[in-house]
Amino acid sequence: MVKPKYKLYTPGPVDVPLEVLKELSSGLVYHREASFAAIFESARKGLQKLMLTANGEVHLLTASGTGAMEAAVVNLVSPGDKVVVATSGRFGERWREINLRYGAFVDEVNRPYGEPIPPEELERKLLGNDSARCVFTTLTETSTGVLNDIKAFGDVCHRLNRILVVDAVAGLGADELRMDDWHVDLVVGGCQKGLAVPPGVSFVALSERAAERVERAKSPRYYFDLRIARRYAAKGQTSWTPAISIFYAMDLSLKRLHRIGMPKYWKAHQQIADMMRAKAAGLGLALFPKRPSNALTVMRMPEGVDGAKVVDICRTRDRILLANGQGDMRGKIVRIGHMGPVTKVEMTKVFGCFQRALKQVRSHTK
């Protein structure tokens, strides 16, 4: 059995509190009886509170966040439809790839890695493409640490009568998101990041407009067919066999979070993010994102410093795992995740480990 030799401070999954891990050892219930229906309904209502939606239709899927992204596409988009994808990193690009696989024509608004999408650019794109009814984007782009202005996107899409779909897998809980007030039509989320639950369950929340579109979409779908999910949800069940133990853990995590309250939880993450950004500036390090998320801190490495070596030293010496850059950014940035229920004291220690590792790598490159 391979056991972890480090604590996770990556952009997800995150370290899981012991209390939540203990829930996983509870005996299983049958997923077609009332005892599971009670857990299902509690988790569903907890997710509505998390996303600040009063009446959003929430479906829970035994799948990764990418599965929920695919569910969003196949239930909203028909082959031949035109869509707009607002891309500022690898997960925005994933929206493009999924839409293309299902036969959509994709028009993009994109910015270089590290830059958010200006809302005015999205508006110009939509004004020039009246046939694209759905807009796909990310709240928090974990490949770069960028936070997009979803409130402004929602204003634009609402005014122009477009469906706004947001990947909030990484930012949900750490970065503010108000589904109803911001006119977001579909939110995609996962349990393994801000909720600090082991991976295994993702979810989608739909506005009334998005729910109506599900009935009209022509894309092939089976496992992710939300029409089937809707029928089972009315009975307090999932369409297919769920990850029951993960439901236990997620329900507990949501209850813990709501005892704090979303505004306080967002503020706590902002304070930790501000502290981490100040510490980075104190070392003379530049942040990679121009509009940073509160879920993670992403720093450019100094000239000649390989971020992969910094990450490796933290893992082997201090038993903490940070994240390297992805793709072309590998070795050029280091990403420190703080999207779960972490504290300032804890993250101060983590940054101290990073600082010592950076100093060691720098000394060997001179």
Image (tube, rainbow, N blue to C red):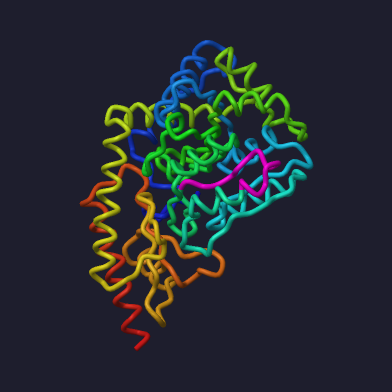
Q: Is residue 222 magenta?
A: no
Q: Report the side of 69 relative to 295 (left or right).
A: right
Total numbered labels placed on residues in the image: 0
* Residue at x 47% of width, y 56% of height: 116
- Camera-side residue of 94 and 6: 94
Would residue 201 be visible to someone looking at this image?
Answer: no
Q: Does residue 241 lie above or below 115 as drawn?
A: above
On the image, the x and y values in percent for residue 301 come to 39, 73
- Camera-side residue of 65 and 33: 65
Would residue 9 be visible to someone looking at this image?
Answer: yes
* Residue at x 35% of width, y 78% of height: 361
Q: Is residue 131 magenta?
A: yes
* Residue at x 35% of width, y 84% of height: 364
Q: Report the side of 234 relative to 45 (left or right).
A: right
Q: Quadrant of the C terminus?
A: bottom left
On the image, the x and y values in percent for residue 27 come to 47, 23
Instruction: Return the residue found at the far bottom.
Output: 366
On the image, the x and y values in percent for residue 223 come to 69, 31
* Residue at x 56% of width, y 28% of height: 206
Instruction: Return the residue found at the far left.
Output: 345
Give the residues in magenta.
126-139
Q: Report the side of 298 relative to 326 (left or right).
A: left
On the image, the x and y values in percent for residue 193 come to 43, 43
- Camera-side residue of 2 and 16: 16
